[in-house]
Amino acid sequence: MPWPMRNIARISIAQARSGQIAAQRQTALLLEMLQENTRLTVAIRSLTERVATLTNEVHHSVVKPAGP
């Protein structure tokens, strides 16, 4: 293979490796973001349930049942 063709082949291989590294970084970042999203979703659910509980407690302490 003539020298210029070998150089082009090396550049192509280097570009392909660079693309693979970038794809791996993006995949790792996406996985990290999904994991953080899951943690936040769990926290939001817990907080929402707590707000619902507190709302019920306040409602029951403010609104007394009508007695005879």
Image: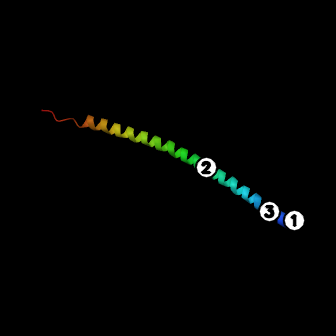
What is the distance, in whole Å, between disc 3 and disc 1 at their CAs?
10 Å
The answer to whether marks 2 and 3 mark residues whose Cβ atoms lie closer than 8 Å is no
Residue 24's spot in the image, x, y percent?
66, 51
Q: Earlier in the sequence, mark 2 or mark 1?
A: 1
Image location of residue 4, percent across then percent down: 85, 67
For mark 2, give the secondary structure. Answer: helix
Q: Which residue is mark 3?
A: 9
User: Which residue is farthest front?
Assistant: 1
Ranked by sequence position, the earlier of labels 2 and 3 is 3
Find the residue positioned furthest to the left.
68
Q: Which residue is mark 2?
A: 29
Mark 3 element type: helix
Q: Say which residue label 1 marks.
A: 3
Residue 29 in the figure: left or right of residue 6: left
Q: Quadrant of the N terminus?
A: bottom right
**Residue at position x 56%, y 48% in the image:** 33
The kind of residue on which mark 2 rests is Leu
Image side of residue 21 versus residue 46, left or right: right
Query: Residue 5's spot in the image, x, y percent?
Result: 83, 66
Residue at mark 2 to residue at mark 3: CA–CA distance:
30 Å
Q: CA distance from mark 2 to mark 1?
A: 39 Å
Q: Residue at x 31, y 35 (%)?
A: 57
- Disc 3 marks which amino acid? Ala
Q: Residues within 10 Å of mark 2 (few under 14, many from 20)?
A: few
User: Which labelled disc corresponds to residue 30?
Assistant: none
Q: Is residue 39 above or below residue 21?
A: above
Residue closest to the far top = 68
What's the residue type where badge 1 is placed?
Answer: Trp
* Residue 44 position by quadrant: top left
Instruction: Answer with mark 3 or mark 1, whichever residue precedes in sequence.
Output: 1
